[in-house]
Image (tube, helix red, strand yellow):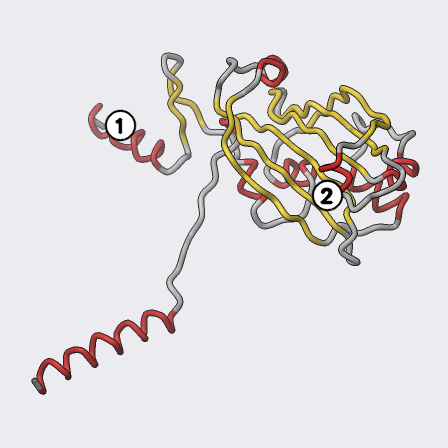
């Protein structure tokens, strides 16, 4: 096989996301796109990582009660007390610090799970078991941001490096908030792709419009 054919094959694999080029290190097999599964699932990072074939390790940075800002209290639909559970974690995927996440929990939920070590246990699993609540819906916002100094240090990237910022509000079957989190995800775990398809009715309507225009033109 010629070198040109090999280069062309490698370029195609890079375009399809199977390989990734890291200058000046070389070309490597790309990591599973963690964020892809967030688009269609209510599941937490632990379940998503498992489904993507990644090994998840959590480092709990802090967990306790804090005074909630007016915005956080509003998001959690909590007026009193003004304290919420705050869980900060650095989540490693295949040994790489990939996700820095701050979870905000309603006061009542925090009281039920405050003794659990979340470096060893899933947050959603604990809420299901202790609170008898089932996460049913999630509203998520995605945007690109630059890594602040603290985030850069935790995620082992350069300050100002691009990160994917995800804000998510998960609610139960009664539409009551269970958890609100703000996460920063490394760029190399943030690739995703979508497939779009035209509605058949729209295509037929277009064809019908073109046919009507053609008949009108012939009559004229």
- Say which element carries label 1: helix
Question: How far from the left and from the top, in percent, is residue 198?
Answer: 37, 63
Q: Residue at horizontal 37%, vertical 38%?
A: 16
C-alpha span from label 2 to label 1: 53 Å
Quarter location, residue 92: top right
Of residue 10 and residue 140, the one placed in the foreground of this image is 140
Quarter in which the N terminus is drawn: top left
Using residue 48 as the reference point, say whether residue 77 is left or right of it: right
Question: How far from the left and from the top, in percent, is residue 49?
Answer: 64, 36
Using residue 127 as the reference point, say whether residue 72 is left or right of it: left
Of residue 35 and residue 152, the one placed in the foreground of this image is 152
Sequence order check, earlier mark of 2 and 1: 1
Using residue 185 as the reference point, say whether residue 198 is left or right of it: left
- Say which element carries label 2: helix
Q: Residue at horizontal 51%, vertical 23%?
A: 146
Question: How far from the left and from the top, in percent, is residue 138?
Answer: 67, 49
Question: How far from the left and from the top, in percent, is residue 52?
Answer: 59, 38
Q: Residue at horizontal 83%, vertical 32%?
A: 85
Residue assigned mark 1: 6
Q: Residue at horizontal 21%, vertical 81%?
A: 212
Residue assigned mark 2: 75
Using residue 165 as the reference point, say whether residue 81 is left or right of it: right
**Mark 2: few, some, or many residues within 10 Å (few <14, many ≥20)?**
some
Quarter location, residue 119: top right
**Mark 1: few, some, or many residues within 10 Å (few <14, many ≥20)?**
few
């Amino acid at each position: 096989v010629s070198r040109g054919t090999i280069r062309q094959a490698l370029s195609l694999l890079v375009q399809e996301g199977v390989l990734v080029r890291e200058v000046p290190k070389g070309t490597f097999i790309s990591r599973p796109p963690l964020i892809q599964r967030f688009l269609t699932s209510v599941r937490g990072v632990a379940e998503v990582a498992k489904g993507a074939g990644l090994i998840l390790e959590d480092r709990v940075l802090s967990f306790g009660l804090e005074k909630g800002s007016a915005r956080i209290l509003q998001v959690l639909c909590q007026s009193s007390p003004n304290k919420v559970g705050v869980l900060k974690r650095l989540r490693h995927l295949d040994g790489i610090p990939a996700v820095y996440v701050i979870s905000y929990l309603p006061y009542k939920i925090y009281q039920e799970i405050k003794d659990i070590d979340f470096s060893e246990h899933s947050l959603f699993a604990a809420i299901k078991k202790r609170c008898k609540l089932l996460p049913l819906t999630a509203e998520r916002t995605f945007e690109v941001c630059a890594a602040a100094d603290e985030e850069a240090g935790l995620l082992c990237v350069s300050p100002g490096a691009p990160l994917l910022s995800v804000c998510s509000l998960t609610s139960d079957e009664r539409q009551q908030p269970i958890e609100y989190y703000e996460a920063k995800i490394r760029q190399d775990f943030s690739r995703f792709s979508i497939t779009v398809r035209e509605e058949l009715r729209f295509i037929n309507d277009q064809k019908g419009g073109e046919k009507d225009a053609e008949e009108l033109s012939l009559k004229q």
